[in-house]
Structures are given as C-alpha cells and as structure tokens.
Amino acid sequence: MKTRILSTTAAALVLAGAAGAQTMQTPDDDMTVTGQLADAGQEIVNTGQAAAGAVVEGAEETYGAASNAAAQIDAAVTEDAIVRSSDGEIVGTIYRTDLDGDRVLIDLDGEMENQIARDGVERVAVQVRSLMAGEEGLMLDMSRDQFTAAIETGPTETTARN
C-alpha cells in the first residue's frame, strides 16, 4: 500500500479546488471560500511587495549615505589636511595622497613623534578607509594611544621616500 503525504500548500490547493466546485456562504460575508482564498493570497502578495519595496528603499538610502560619506572623505583628503585621532587629538597632517592605492601618508606632529617609542618615525601610511570626515576635518578610527601602539608594532619601510 502506498502512502502519500500532501504538503500544507498542496492540501490547501486541493481544498481550494474542492471549494470551487461548491460555493459555500459564510454567515458574515457572501464571498465563496475560493474568493476568500484568492483575497488572502492577494494580501500575501501585497505584503511581500511592500516588504520588498521597503528593503529596496532602505538599501538606496544606505548606498546614498555611503556615497555621500565617501565624497566627503575624498574632498577632505588633501595635502596639509589635519588628521585627528578618535579622541580628538591631533596626530599630524596629510603629507601625500594615493587615493588609487587607498592610502595617505601622514606627517606626524612633533608631540606624536615624541610619544612613539621607535626612533626616526616621522611619517606613516594609513588606509583611507581608516579615516572619517567630521566637523573638525579628518579623524582616524582609533584613539591616539591605539594609533601609537599600531605604529610601534607595525611594519617599517627600509627604503627612504620623499
């Protein structure tokens, strides 16, 4: 003997087909069961379309905000622009930009140079994505202490470039 298991969807379709053969009146509504199922299906479709529209709208807003932020950073990343740490301390100025390489060279200010335990560090390369454009100019995504630690433990360049 074969046993068949109908999924909920298949069972609903079978019931809908059977209901279509007989029109049943509900006490509160004179719509057939088939009509009610069709209306319910249309509501599901409408809800899905509304949700999809909201997702697309949200994505457009996020993309627009990201594009705006990127444009602000591109405009702010200029030579001699002041760079601050996330705690508001000045760490240096932009010495050279390489936006195609996604990095900038920061000429450290004297106080920052003195804070670093490594000798001879005057300039450091930072990825542009580590910078944010704020009200007071460019800001790193790390505090002054975190930046100092990153410089002290980071790689060094063996050839001098001007």
Image (spheres, grey):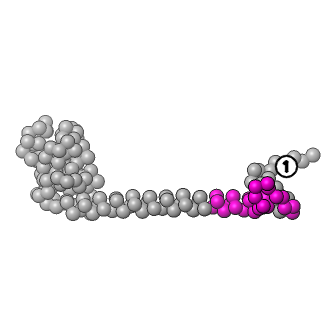
Q: Quadrant of residue 23?
A: bottom right
Tell me what residue is drawn at x 8 percent, y 42 percent.
Answer: 111
Is there any visible trace of residue 29 in the rendered image? yes
State the residue position of label 1.
4
Q: Quadrant of residue 101?
A: bottom left
Quadrant location, the C terminus = bottom left
Say which of 15 and 73 sits in front: 15
User: Would you place residue 21 above or below residue 87 in this image?
Assistant: below
Tell me the element at label 1: loop
Specify whether 118 is left or right of 86. Answer: left
Is residue 87 part of the magenta span, yes or no? no
Q: Residue lying furthest right in this view? A: 1
Q: Nearer the viewer, residue 33 or 140?
A: 33
Q: Is residue 25 magenta?
A: yes
Front residue of 93/24: it is: 24
For the point 15% across and 44% down, the residue is: 89
Q: Which residue extends farthest left?
A: 110
Residue furthest top in the image: 117
Q: Residue at x 76, y 55 (%)?
A: 28
User: Quick check: 76 above or below 143?
Assistant: below
Residue ID at (11%, 58%): 80
Q: Is residue 105 left or right of residue 18?
A: left
- Name the spot of residue 83 as percent of width and height, x first: 16, 51
Q: Which residues are magenta?
A: 21-45
Q: Position of residue 120 (x, y in %)?
A: 9, 43
Decide: few, some or many residues near mark 1? Use Cα within 10 Å; few <14, some 14-19, many ≥20: few
